[in-house]
Amino acid sequence: MVSLLGSCLRTTRVFLDPSFSCALYFVHCGHSFHALSSVFVSSLVETFETPHFAKRKLDCQEQCLNSTRQSDIGILVEKVRVGNSHDEILQSLAHDQTCNSIHLSHDLVNRLLFHFKDDWKSALGVFRWAELRGYKHKSEAYDTLVDILGKMKQMDQMEALLEEMKKGQLVTLKTVGKAMRRFSGAGQWENAVRVFDKLGTFGLEKNTESMNLLLDTLCKERKVEQAREIFLELKSHISPNANTFNIFIHGWCKVCRVDEAYWTIQEMRGHGFLPCVISYSTIIQFYCCRCDFCKVYELLDEMEAALGSTPNVVTYTSVMSALAKSEKYEEALEIAQRMRLVGCKPDALFYNSLIHSLGRAGRPQEAVHVFEEEMPSTGIPPNTSTYNSMIAMLCHQAQELKALNLLNEMETSMICKPDVQTYYPLLKSCFRTGKIDSLLRQLLDDMVKKHHLSLDKSAYTLLIHGLCRANKCDWAYCLFEEMIGKDIMPRYRTCCLLLEEVKLKHLYDAAKKIEIVMQKL
């Protein structure tokens, strides 16, 4: 069969419309935690024989093990110097006696790769060092590295790793999905199609699942017409399913061609598939992004009539979030009430959006009630995003102390841990209150050393802008250099602001380096 890429390149028309962007709605499942209850014992011997004591002993051992892992991660992170090549990082670790005495495990390697998810040189250096130690990586670690290299636009390195995985028969459909998404995200959609064409060489099949993966990848990157051409060629020997058509409905909405999305629903019926909640919810999300809430309410009613059932929690949460984003907070809360009235059960993401809406509507006490009372009563444990919503709300209300107490509660709980987004509102508060030399330094130290979080582009941007305005351009420039060392390219506006500040301080060498970076942008 002629490759799909050749066929697609001959027949496709390029369609570009950057004016519309729909956020995808992802459902994250939390992990519930049941605290151990205390037991009274009548004698020491009975205590040591109880299952409860054995459980506590195991918990203590697990905590000690976690502490050891954190210590090992801290040692390794300290040894990795930002800005070096991955080979230099490998050699640095390989010649360090302390590092080589650390016991390697899948958990430790995965945590290290997560820490360096925005620093491909360090991630690759650590990965190769573990191999040098005789450690055999699982496919999960390879997949993570494929994703990191692709995210940082290191396509040659990513392709070399894929070839390495192919030799070891480690390539799965998950690997292929990550590679195709990263190629498309880098503007190399043709290479994404080539990966699909080569599925057989990886020991994988061209079937409905893999076809949908390719179509979804292209549609998410706005290459809907190319995806359509590929589908027309493949459908004669690969049967579509309902998900195939839902992918196209989302794709057409993403490029603002909602009429095509409606036509896809008709095509879906022609293939014997009935439109589902996902089909309608995708079009509702399109109108949410355009703030056309009259059409949203119309489709919600149509959905109930067509499907004979109510929209699900994802649909309601999407509408509520869009209304809140448009600063229609009272309407957003009415959607929450509408959902409750029809008996639709909430989930963690619904509560996260509700807390955000209540906070923005100037009803923080109700948001606290939802967090402290309603969520526990419905059995929905908070996740990282829930805490993030609460911390952001408290910072917005200038209640930084309560926000810090909530951060401390989050850190000590076993339910979830902070991420970079947790710290954004706290970092902003430091600039607003002027607590830069004290609290800001402590928060950054905790992020990197305590939680092993790697600063991303948004975090660097926030910090550099804030420090420049606070007349601390030396510190801002240090962060700028660190950012460049990780191959994270700053925004042009960030460079302009920093350049202006370093010139005022007569830091001409720094100014020259910033100008070189600006030329690349």
Image: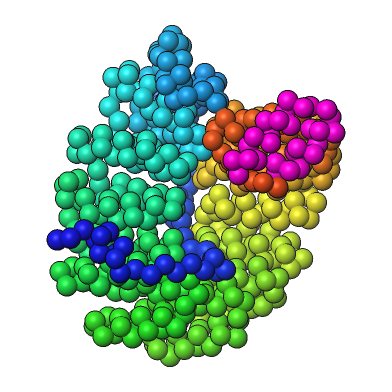
Please state if 345 lies on the left or on the right of 371 as rendered. Answer: left
For the stretch drawn in magenta, the main secondary structure is: helix
Quick check: 230 above or below 131?
A: below
Q: Quadrant of residue 166?
A: top left
Question: Does residue 500 show up magenta in the picture?
Answer: yes
Measured from the top left, where is residue 131 in percent x and y? 32, 23
Measured from the top left, where is residue 362 in percent x and y? 77, 66
Measured from the top left, where is residue 431 in percent x and y? 79, 42
Q: Closer to the camera, 329 or 339?
A: 329
Quick check: 126 above or below 242?
A: above
Q: Closer to the camera, 438 or 220?
A: 220
Specify the quadrant that holds the C terminus: top right
**Magenta residues, start to end:** 494-521
* Residue 426 visible in the shown view: no
Q: Closer to the camera, 113 or 489?
A: 489
Measured from the top left, where is residue 100 in percent x and y? 40, 13
Residue in the picture at 62% in, 66% down = 354
Quick check: 250 above or below 473?
A: below
* Residue 122 visible in the shown view: yes
Residue in the picture at 39% in, 52% down = 188
Specify the quadrant that holds the N terminus: bottom left
Q: Closer to the camera, 277 or 172?
A: 172
Residue in the picture at 67% in, 71% down = 326
Residue in the picture at 36% in, 24% down = 128
Quick check: 369 above or below 126?
A: below
Q: Quadrant of residue 494?
A: top right
Residue extending farthest to the bottom is 305
Question: Does residue 439 show up magenta in the picture?
Answer: no
How was this image coloured? rainbow
Q: How many marks?
A: 0
